[in-house]
Amino acid sequence: MRDIYLSELARFRNTALIALALHLLALLFLNQLSNPLQFGREASLLVLFLYLLPCAALALYQFGTYRQPGRWLWLLHRPLPPRRIFAAIAAASATLILAVLALPVLAMTALIDTLGTRVVDLRHYLLPLQLLLFCLCAWQCGACIALSRSRSAFVILVLPPLVLLYPASGFALLLPGVLCLLLLAWIAAAAFKPDRTAPSTRAGTQMLVALPLQISFYFVLLWAGSLAYQYAEILLGVHPLNREVPPAGGFTEASRATGAQLLQLGLSTATDPEAPVWIRQAALAEPVQLYPDLVRYPVRHALTNVNETTWNDGGIDWTFSHDSMRFEGRHHITGAPAGSFGSAGRGSTAPFETPPEIMPAHGHVLFATPHHLYRMDKDGSGWRELAAVAANEMFAGFPEQAGQRSYLLTNTRLLVFRGADDDRLEPAYSVALPRPLSDLARIDILPLLDGSVVSFLYGRAALEGIQGAQQIVMHVDAAGRSRTVARRALTHDFPPLFEHKDWWFSPLLHALVTLPRLAYDTGRVPDAAATVPNPLLLPRPRAAWLAALAGSLLAAAGAAWWLRACAAPPALRRYWLASCLLLGLPALCALAVLQPRTLFRPQAAAPPSAVPAA
């Protein structure tokens, strides 16, 4: 085992040295152009892809060259179990990945921390470890693809992103990353055997290998089917989002309408005697539009930044530190430290409650935490808290000003303030949200002399299975008393089977992949406690139930037909039949990958013909 490990290192020694030199030069160049530790999520994902690609390619090359008949016999014809041989190759590859990719990133982080004045937090030292986990997972995926009997095994590449690509704390992602790596290693080691095309006859091994494949097939088939359906609608000219004139009475039409048009559509069904007057006023005015544009806050110790973490104030770059929970200053030209900026202003060491969301505005910068809203003038002349809410409420957007009123959205209500944002906003009244925030698309507000008309447009989460898209119009008097004057039900632009496709395609797998989203803290602004829709218990239409039943029966019938020509023990046959019946088509696809079908059965030899006596 030691000799295999050393020979594999010697095999790629020169290539690794060249790759190490190129990697170090790329890191130095990137550090001179920007601050790689403060990259946003999109840039971080692009860089991560550039790291994962060579790791998967390394495994494909290693096992692609070894699996040639002569080399395969040479590799496995040793007094060692195949799993120990695979462990030696995997250990050598892990050593190369550690030396070439992970350690240079760790060294760059340490140098920036010790020799510079840029913000380096504990979470940045987790980056090399998480990068190593990702790269090892990519290598294991490449090994699974190279060793599998079927080319469809490439779907296993979907598994690591499903487990690890969440905007959650880096500490929370460590254990799932290790478990994902161990599972992929088990799958690759199970495929590393003298006859790669022969399936395992052990039900336990196939069960452990099948579940990741079933989850991966669930997403790949769902994604491919959705794209095929939508491209067909685009080619036919009937796609709701691609048509020049959207379907009448639907959510697409309402979301494309201007504020005046949407208010007129909503008030057209009102029976209030003042509705005609409001319709005429809406046609002449410009309603204020408010969007729930703050649906997720940064999570402390998250490895990637969802949005901006740095802002400039008079030549000083202020970067938020997740360790100190305040902004740390650095002179843009000289790089000298410039002190701290806490929740009480410049020079303050008071920490923010959570990493704030930053929004540059005209002449100032707004900072939002879940319960506090701050403003900083760009010239550094003023810093103040604009508004605050109780602990059971969270801001879901930045303020919009119209005349002498400012409007601010939370996850439970619409806040209306007196005065502009030059001073602290004084609350005038509030309007409770009639439905959950997660389904809210926008709010249109028409100011009146005796109050305002407010339109709530719901239907943003229709493709996630939330029913009842509608427009709700309220009249709010000057004292803040609100009453509903119109409700307009919106038709669904997509058929029910498309809106509920992620559920009926495999209800059990849908529940399984939804659990991580519920378990991780991704900073998402929750709905009010009384209106929280449980994604696992959403009501489904009859068509979705029938489609789920048909898919399960079709998968079970396909499994029975496939297993007729498979040399599988009875326990394994029962497992696959039950799996296809419960999990649907993704289980059938996994069966086709893991259990080969013998198309031509060997026939019994014919008895020798009688030889006539001489």
Image (tube, helix red, strand yellow):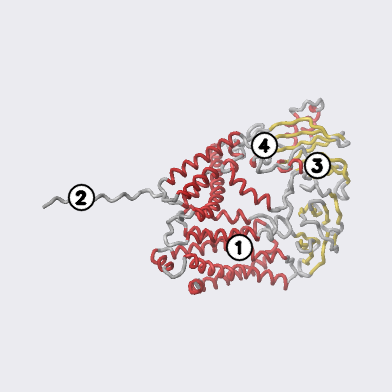
> Residue 467, which numbered label?
4
Instruction: Kindly identify the amino acid type of the residue bearing the numbered disc 3.
Output: Leu
Identify residue for label 2.
Answer: 609
Please tell me which residue is depicted at 81% across the width and 51% down the height of the picture: 371
Q: CA distance from mark 2 to mark 1?
A: 65 Å
Q: CA distance from mark 2 to mark 4?
A: 75 Å
- Real-space CA distance between mark 3 and mark 4, rounded to the nearest whole angstrom: 23 Å
Q: Is residue 79 above or below residue 294?
A: below
Which residue has dot 1 on it?
Answer: 133
> In this orientation, does residue 47 appear?
no
Q: Earlier in the sequence, mark 1 or mark 4?
A: 1
Tags 2 and 1 touching, CB below 8 Å: no
Q: What is the three-letter code of the residue carrying label 2?
A: Ser
Residue, x 70% and y 70% (percent of image)?
A: 112
Q: Secondary structure at mark 1?
A: helix
Q: Earlier in the sequence, mark 2 or mark 1?
A: 1
- Label 3 and label 2: CA atoms lie apart by 94 Å
Mark 2, Cα crowd under 10 Å, few <14 / some 14-19 / many 20+, is few
Which residue position is annotated with label 3? 414
